[in-house]
Image (cartoon, grey):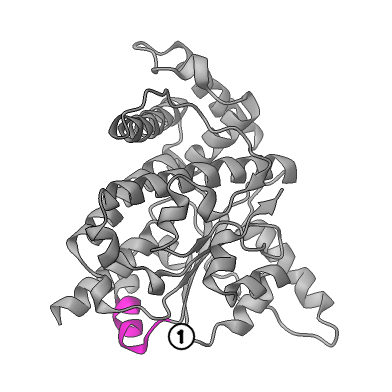
Amino acid sequence: MLLALLLVLYVVAMLTLVSFLQTEALDPSAPHTAVADDHGFASRHANAQRQLSVFAPPMASADEERIIAAAVDLLSTSNPPLRGFLERRPPLAMLHMQLLRHLRALGAKGTASALAGSYRRAWERRAANHEAAVERRGEVATWQMPASAGHWPAARELTHGEWAVRFVKIGLNCGRTTCGCPVKVERIGTYDTSAIVVEAHGEEKLKEFYHSLLECQAEALDTDSLAAGRMLRAYEVFDLRGIRLAQVNLATLRFARSMLTTFSMCYPETTSRAVIINMPSFLRMPLRGLLEVLPERVRAKVSIFGDDYQQVLASELDADALKLLSADHNDVVSHRCPR
């Protein structure tokens, strides 16, 4: 019973990683499935329009722009200065996009001062993550915002990617929703966490892989959002097929806790929806029970299915995403997508 409970907590921790601590939520009254018609066009169009308002909210309003501009001034003139900000900050449009995500996450607390503080903490943690990694490798490098690569990378192209995909199966942009949000696939049920633990520096390398993933995803989302004229966020699919008790260990829970802290602090408003598929029956009721005690804004972002997910996902995802959901592991971790 204790191991089963640990497994449930592990799954919840990994799902919490996708921004459940952020303020903005899906509209709980919005339907999750489209109504079919003779040709499918009307339902697909209606579903795409619903997704635009729910998954990809509008860009900054005039009031939000004023708060963001004031926060940029505070960050640029702060005393003590934010280390490296003036030298290595991203282009202004990208900086405004990042600040908009932080501002939306703050909700009613979103003053210029609070926004500048939130971004400062995120900047410092991202820099510390990078510097700890290069120090461990005996290198000398200064962190800066990632530059656009012109495409969404494959998981195996990230830091330690070729090593990491032996143990974790992830696709960063496996197709799109009908409104254009990227679909990320994590096959949690296939994770070989016990093998990572016995690898030399396995925990540290996995953290560096995930930090690289989060940085690349954040940069790609912001670039795509500026091109689309809407704040795009990832649609996360967690596939639990094959999940087992052996995946639970203290290293796994320690890793999940560390990633949760980094994600919630540094990458707010980057997830629109989380869909858990192939949930084993013995976990379905306990996990749903745990979700029931969480805030509505969290529950509204989560859908749980066994193997009966096809109809719902077919109404929300494009053909490429549906194909990659059933593709073999190598295709998923090798998939890269031009912007």
Tell me the quarter of the picture where residue 195 sits.
bottom left
**1 relative to 152, above or below:** below
Q: Is residue 286 magenta?
A: yes
Residue 143 visible to the viewer: yes
Q: Residue at x 41, y 48 (%)?
A: 209
**146 relative to 78, above or below:** below
Horizontally, residue 88 falls left or right of residue 254, namely right
Q: Is residue 66 magenta?
A: no
Tell me the quarter of the picture where residue 59 sits.
top right
| Residue 50 percent location from the top left of the image | 68, 65
- For the residue pair 223 and 230, the one nearer the viewer reads as 223
- For the residue pair 157 and 309, the one nearer the viewer reads as 157
| Residue 124 percent location from the top left of the image | 36, 28
At label 1, the amino acid type is Gly
**169 relative to 154, above or below:** below
Residue wearing tag 1: 306
Horizontally, residue 117 falls left or right of residue 225, namely left
Horizontally, residue 243 falls left or right of residue 267, namely left
Q: Residue at x 34, y 47 (%)?
A: 205
Q: Residue at x 35, y 44 (%)?
A: 262
Magenta range is 279-289
Which quarter of the rendering shows the N terminus?
bottom left
Q: Label 1 neighbourhood size at 10 Å, few (<14), some (14-19), many (20+)?
A: some
**81 relative to 219, above or below:** above
Q: Residue at x 36, y 83 (%)?
A: 284
Residue 59 visible to the viewer: no
* Secondary structure under the numbered disc 1 in the rendered image: loop
Q: Is the magenta stretch mostly helix, strand or loop?
A: helix
Horizontally, residue 188 falls left or right of residue 215, namely left
| Residue 327 percent location from the top left of the image | 60, 74
- For the residue pair 337 and 118, the one nearer the viewer reads as 337
